[in-house]
Amino acid sequence: MRFKKAASVLAAGMIAAVSATALAGCSDKDKLAGQMFDFGDDYYKSVSERFTLNYDEMLYDDFTNGIDLSRWVISDSVWDQWSTDQNGVRPQNVFLVDDENNPDTHLLLRANGSYYNMDNDSFYTDEEKAQFGDGKNLFTSAQGYGMNSGAGISTIEALGPGRYDVKMKACPRVGALTSMWVYSWFTQNDGSFQQNEIDIEIGLKPDFSQVFFTTWTSPANNTNMPTPVNYFVNDGDWHVYSFDWVTDAEVPYVDYYIDGVKILTIDANVPTTNATLNLGVWCPSWAGGGATDPESGNISVDSRMFDSDYAEISWWRYIPFQMGGWEQRPVQNRNYADGYVPKTLTELPDINKCANGNFERGDGDYNAPDLNFSYGNPWKDFTVDDEDNESFVPNSSTGIVTDALDANNRCAEIVNGGLLGQWLRGASEGFKYKLTGRFRTTGNAEAAFRYTYVLGYSTTSRTSGNKTLSLGSSEEWKEFSFEFTVDKEGAQSIRYYLMNAAERGNCYFDDISIIYTGH
């Protein structure tokens, strides 16, 4: 079903079915509104009592028949270009989904972090990857196309006041910013720049217990409200994010909702000019609390320590309010890929939370010579200071990525004692994971997997306790698989390590995969 005036709507576990026929001929608008908003709090459900809803101009899209290019453009653009280490939003990161095992997921928007590896991108052929280097790629070095890039779509039509809803799962990685927003810009008669924007943003700061709600009427006039919520927004569950844009009040305002529950109202810097609706995820250098590298002046990799992950969209809806107080002006879309048709996936991809889990990339593969900046390998050497804290030792030789066993296949090698580890930021209390991989040992070494609880998202956050799981010894490659749960109160991230627990001999690891399984 493409843009349309009715559909089955799943929200907060309830189904509100409205037929096209009912919309076209229904005279009982209160009854119709009751069907459409039968979830959430009384305030959310009473929208038709507070405003006159224009059902004839209602727009709804669940993308089950693709993206209607008469209604949407697929963005191919870089904005905030002063952040030179991000690749904007690219059409190759937009995917349609037709997976009978995941019937609610219809649109997939991919975010590629600082550890993205185009060579491992199984969705595109080598010929297609070669086409990605079309002059728009800010990186011309070894990382390949797409590092620090996202995906977005935008309505061609500029919309006005009304109720906006989207059912989605936010991208769960620190450094990826998932948003629903309306946006327009134009130059006024006096030459000043006018920016109109209303946003719901997830991941603006590295704290998945809050959502950012913002309004803009120019670059200098904006209201930004970080708002705590009672769940982790990267929990992998469906949530309905909504706002009511009201322009005919004495002071225009925006009501914001999550799962039909009113969160707050903003009545400052509220636009009164039409704007296009955008759904997207992107990786600006300042998202996730990115820090500046003191030597190069560029944004540190600490803000986007992942390969690829996704925001999932089920449906989107807009119901106009019949009201005044706003003006219609010509609105220009950002750059877009004219006529681009996204690939359709018949099953959702398993997201490996471990970057470079097959160890095929060496340290040199993460350099960005055009920026005089190195992102470093995601695998880091660590040494243990005490029972609860580990310190990063960049020049340690105990844990390395090597091809010592096979010139055609890299793996991890841990000599004597030591830890070779990664960060998993946003691994909150109660989150469950499945770990798989393979190992082998020599010299009576003992392979182990260890993870440490981190009480925050920063690389300087305090740690609190750890767990070690023995894998044993094996002179031949041996596969392992087990599940573990983040069960430390207050944990917001983990650091996990491949380990030689015996402090003698050598341990080798390969094909490491960490999959989130729920909470």
Image (spheres, rainbow, N blue to C red):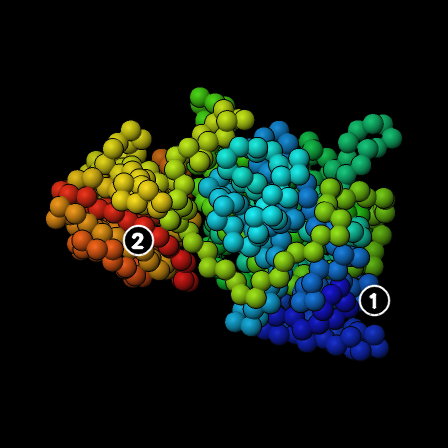
Helix, strand, or loop for circle 1? helix
Residue 90 visible in image: yes
Would you call the spot at circle 2 few (<14 residues within 10 Å), some (14-19), or many (20 or more)?
A: some
Q: Which mark is residue 56?
A: 1
**Vertical relation: 451 (above or below) 392:** below
Residue 263 visible in image: no
Residue at (57% x, 42% y) in the render: 146
Q: Position of residue 472 (x, y in %)?
A: 18, 55
Say which quadrant the C terminus sits in: bottom left
Say which quadrant the N terminus sits in: bottom right
Residue at (55% x, 58% y) in the render: 169
The kind of residue tagged 1 is Asp
Q: Which circle's residue, 2 or 1, is located before the other in the chain?
A: 1
Is residue 434 found left or right of 208 in the rendered image? Answer: left
Of all residues shown, which one is farthest toward the front?
407
Q: Which mark is residue 488?
A: 2
Helix, strand, or loop for circle 2? loop
Would you call the spot at circle 1 few (<14 residues within 10 Å), some (14-19), or many (20 or more)?
A: few
The kind of residue tagged 2 is Lys
266 or 224: nearer the eye? 224
Q: Position of residue 189 (x, y in %)?
A: 87, 30
Asked which quadrant contains residue 219, the reply is top right
286 or 142: nearer the eye? 142
Residue at (37% x, 55% y) in the render: 514
Q: Position of residue 241 (x, y in %)?
A: 61, 57
